[in-house]
Image (cartoon, rainbow, N blue to C red):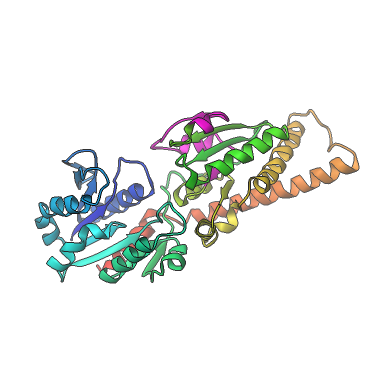
Amino acid sequence: MRIVFLSPRFYPEIGGVEKHAFEVAKRLSKKGHKIAIITEGNKDERFKMDNIEVHRFYFGKKSWLKKFIIWQKLFSKRNLLKKADVVHCHDVFFWYLPFRFLYPRKKVYTTFHGYETRFPPSKKAVMVRKLSEELSLGNIIVGDYIKKWYGTKPTYVTYGAVDKYHVSSIKYQVSKYPRILFIGRLEEDTGIPIYLKTLEILKEKRIRFTFSAVGDGSLKKHVQKFGKVHGFIKNVVPYILKSDIVFASSYLSIITALSLRKPVFSIYDNPLKKDYLKMTPFSKYITIRNSPKLLADELKSVGRSKSIRNKLLRGKLRSIPSGEFVSRLHLRNKLRSITARNKTNLGYEWVKQQTWDKVVDLYIKLWGI
């Protein structure tokens, strides 16, 4: 079959939509389907990768004229759309809007990946989603929260997947001081200000740790006060492997960390983000908080229990420190540490089942092929 994806961005660009569209397209190509991608970029170009035909266009800067430029350039590829057996839009159904009426019998579907970084969603955003849903023959949503906040009636729900080499049997390694890694854009909507306030509290309490971030954004200078910023990285796995704790608030980063048996701490600062995190099958395997103080309390326990365990392992302590206060503190920390490890192990068992092949199967069922 001839399948055309419309995607706002595409691999090798870094991001959840880019990764999702590429992994699905790559596997469909291996099944013998002819895949073409229409996407946005810094220049007009056409190339092939993994037997996928990529058509990248520069649509110009954001303005009220941009949609007409998009439609004009897509019109130049109308034969590609006309010959397609299936057209699938990743969020950007409005790119295809004129062609929905030009080719009324064409099979067209949509995947809704996320939300516009503002809260609450604008009436326009909700209206565009509903229009996209109504004009599509079916849809896939990435996350159950989309049903609640956009009123979408999904055909299927997914949370993405991980590569097989991510799913690891690596044991949880204890270090002297917790190594904390943040993954994501360094912008307010990712919750980075709350994470940074948490680190401030840990410093005030003289809880030692090391910190680094994989990502970039307008708050980079603020983040650099606490540790190194590596920028956007195509393969975050080596950085996760070297960490003890992962700060992440996006699905792809969370399940990748779980696949490597790392405890994940996520925050929310509005009701939508709360549902984004808590209305997931993996919510019980991660720690979700909405304030830096609560998050710091969890991290203090992890840090202290690790310190005691580390000394015991190195032979620097022959037994648990004595004293009623210390004993109670240790027992509480030990309990939290065991709970965190159990959650991480259960999360690992869950994420092992989340493969890209399963996601591809959803698309095939959606299209009826």
Answer with the quarter of the image where residue 103 lies: bottom left
Query: For the view shown, which residue lies furthest in the front direction?
Result: 64
232 part of magenta stretch: yes
Q: In the rendered view, does 93 fall on the left or right side of 325?
A: left
Q: Is residue 103 visible?
A: no
Q: Which residues are magenta?
A: 221-248
Residue located at (14% from left, 50% from top) = 73
Of residues 340 and 138, the one nearer the viewer is 138
Quarter containing the N terminus = bottom left
Residue located at (41% from left, 35% from top) = 233
Q: In the rendered view, does 121 fall on the left or right side of 74?
A: right
66 part of magenta stretch: no
Of residues 284 and 291, the one nearer the viewer is 291
Quarter containing the C terminus = bottom left
Position of 178 relative to 143 (above/below): above
Residue located at (42% from left, 59% from top) = 121
Residue 188 lies, in percent from the top left, at: 49, 44
Q: How many marks?
A: 0
Residue located at (40% from left, 60% from top) = 122
Q: In the rendered view, does 302 fall on the left or right side of 5?
A: right
Residue 344 lies, in percent from the top left, at: 59, 50
Q: Is residue 199 visible?
A: yes
Of residues 85 and 165, the one nearer the viewer is 85
Position of 263 relative to 156 (above/below): above
Residue 290 lies, in percent from the top left, at: 61, 52
Position of 188 relative to 133 (above/below): above
Q: In the rendered view, does 115 fall on the left or right side of 245?
A: left
